[in-house]
Image (spheres, helix red, strand yellow):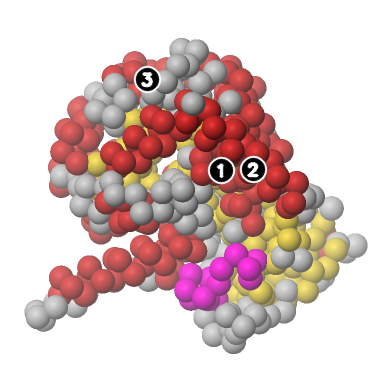
């Protein structure tokens, strides 16, 4: 099916195409065919479904580079968590072992549907509760069933009984999902401090991922121990664009230099770092940019944090600008502040690059797959439209997202998720949550 989105403000996030105050986006099947000021006479526009986007913004879908999706039934169960240790003790040590494969499915499906509803068309699920092959299959099936562009990053559980099938089972998962909307990565931790040496990124796991030809997402990257590990990885040739370091707070200048020199990607979790208090508690955006790294953004843990990308963009934008002005206060220095376009870039194109998918998604570039949003700029909280990027970053929220496409398939229309029975979903989520909590308490 061909669809012509016409008459709206188009934010492409493609540096060569730029933006259009009024323009068209033509989609054919899975792909974006053309972007321009008037595509009504384009050959593939003949017979296309016409979507009038007057008063709307058409933009790329957001990209979440790191979320522990299985936890979604326990959303905001520890909203005032005090530190990383409290999260690990309550969620990973006490709750995670109570999850059945069915519970992983329910939680991951809920997270993915929430992502789509909030305009996130690509989500990396850092699935670190893979207690069995069935648990991993359930997590992936949930991504498939929602229609999101999913990246399943598989890791063994931190605590409790499990089948010891990781990491070898990742080979099976990758073989089954080497094409289509769901892809597979290896998930690890930076060091052995939290869960022991099995989970820590090291030559053995790097070689395993390299043999499969898959990327590696490394969580809990912070502090002096991670800084030392990064230097070791650089020396051993274990870094590069295929590796994503998550959080990256409290790292040394030398570690950042190694990250930048090797082209290693970074996933920042602005609200997680600040709210939970990871190392310095300051998202490492200035450090990343100084090293030549443009990071992706992530949600992290919904047990304590917001679920949408608007919150991440605004938190990072405010924190960085606060730091910049604070550093310059009382001096003649000019604050080096990031812009709304910077954070939108992090939430779209750089997120796709971080997930290894920038040739497929992240911008409205002809030839890429049609992962896009239509955002109403005539709603009370978005009117009048004066600056499209500023509206997306500082004004809009999930209620303004009218349409979401993933690979050309409409997943949200008229402001509602397509084919989702919210009442039935709620029933399943509550039943799963109650069963988990009952098991954990027994």
Q: Position of residue 384 (x, y in %)?
A: 59, 87
> Which residue matches tag 2?
429
Q: CA distance from mark 3 to mark 2?
A: 34 Å
Dots 2, 1 in contact, CB < 8 A: yes
Give the prevailing secondary structure in the magenta stretch.
Answer: helix
> As rendered, which of 288 and 123 lies closer to the eye?
123
> Which residue matches tag 3?
205
Which of disc 1 and disc 2 is earlier in sequence? 1
Which of disc 3 and disc 1 is earlier in sequence? 1
> Which residue matches tag 1?
73
Check disc 3: other Cα within 10 Å, few if <14, some if 14-19, many if 20+. Answer: some
What's the magenta region?
A: 388-401
Q: CA distance from mark 1 to mark 3?
A: 31 Å
Q: Position of residue 111 (x, y in %)?
A: 58, 46
The part of the image, by quadrant, that contains residue 260 is: top left
Image position of 380 (left or right of 202):
right
* In the rendered image, the vertical position of residue 286 relative to residue 159, given as above or below: below
Magenta span contains residue 390: yes
């Amino acid at each position: 099916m061909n669809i012509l989105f016409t008459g709206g403000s188009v934010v492409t996030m493609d540096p060569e195409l730029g933006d259009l105050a009024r323009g068209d986006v033509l989609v054919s099947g899975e792909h974006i065919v053309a972007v321009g000021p008037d595509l009504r006479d384009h050959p593939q526009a003949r017979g296309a479904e016409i979507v009038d986007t007057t008063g709307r913004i058409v933009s790329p879908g957001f990209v979440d580079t790191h979320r522990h999706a299985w936890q979604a039934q326990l959303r905001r169960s520890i909203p005032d968590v005090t530190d990383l240790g409290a999260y690990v003790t309550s969620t990973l040590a006490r709750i995670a072992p109570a999850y059945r494969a069915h519970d992983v499915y329910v939680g991951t499906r809920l997270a993915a549907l929430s992502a789509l509803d909030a305009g996130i068309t690509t989500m990396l699920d850092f699935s670190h509760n893979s207690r069995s092959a069935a648990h991993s299959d359930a997590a992936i099936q949930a991504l498939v069933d929602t229609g999101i562009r999913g990246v399943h990053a598989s890791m063994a559980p931190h605590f409790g009984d499990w089948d010891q099938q990781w990491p070898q089972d990742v080979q099976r998962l990758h073989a089954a999902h080497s094409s289509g909307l769901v892809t597979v990565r290896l998930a690890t931790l930076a060091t052995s401090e939290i869960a022991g040496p099995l989970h820590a990124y090291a030559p053995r796991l790097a070689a395993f991922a390299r043999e499969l030809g898959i990327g590696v997402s490394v969580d809990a990257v912070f502090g002096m121990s991670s800084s030392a590990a990064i230097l070791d990885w650089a020396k051993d040739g274990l870094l590069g664009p295929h590796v994503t370091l998550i959080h990256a707070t409290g790292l040394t200048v030398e570690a950042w230099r190694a990250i930048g020199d090797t082209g290693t990607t970074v996933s920042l979790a602005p609200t997680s770092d600040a709210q939970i208090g990871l190392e310095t508690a300051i998202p490492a955006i200035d450090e990343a940019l100084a090293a030549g790294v443009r990071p992706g953004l992530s949600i992290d843990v919904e047990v304590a944090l917001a679920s949408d990308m608007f919150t991440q963009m605004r938190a990072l934008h405010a924190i960085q600008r606060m730091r910049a002005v604070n550093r310059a206060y009382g001096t003649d220095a000019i604050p080096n502040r990031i812009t709304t376009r910077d954070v939108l870039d992090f939430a779209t194109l750089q997120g796709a690059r971080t997930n290894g998918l920038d040739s497929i998604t992240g911008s409205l570039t002809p030839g890429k797959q049609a992962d896009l949003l239509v955002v109403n700029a005539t709603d009370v909280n978005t009117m009048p439209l004066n600056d499209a990027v500023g509206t997306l970053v500082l004004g809009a929220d999930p209620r303004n997202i009218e349409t979401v496409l993933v690979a050309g398939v409409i997943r949200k229309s008229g402001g509602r998720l397509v084919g989702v029975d919210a009442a039935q979903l709620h029933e399943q989520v509550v039943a799963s949550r109650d069963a988990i909590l009952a098991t954990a308490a027994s």
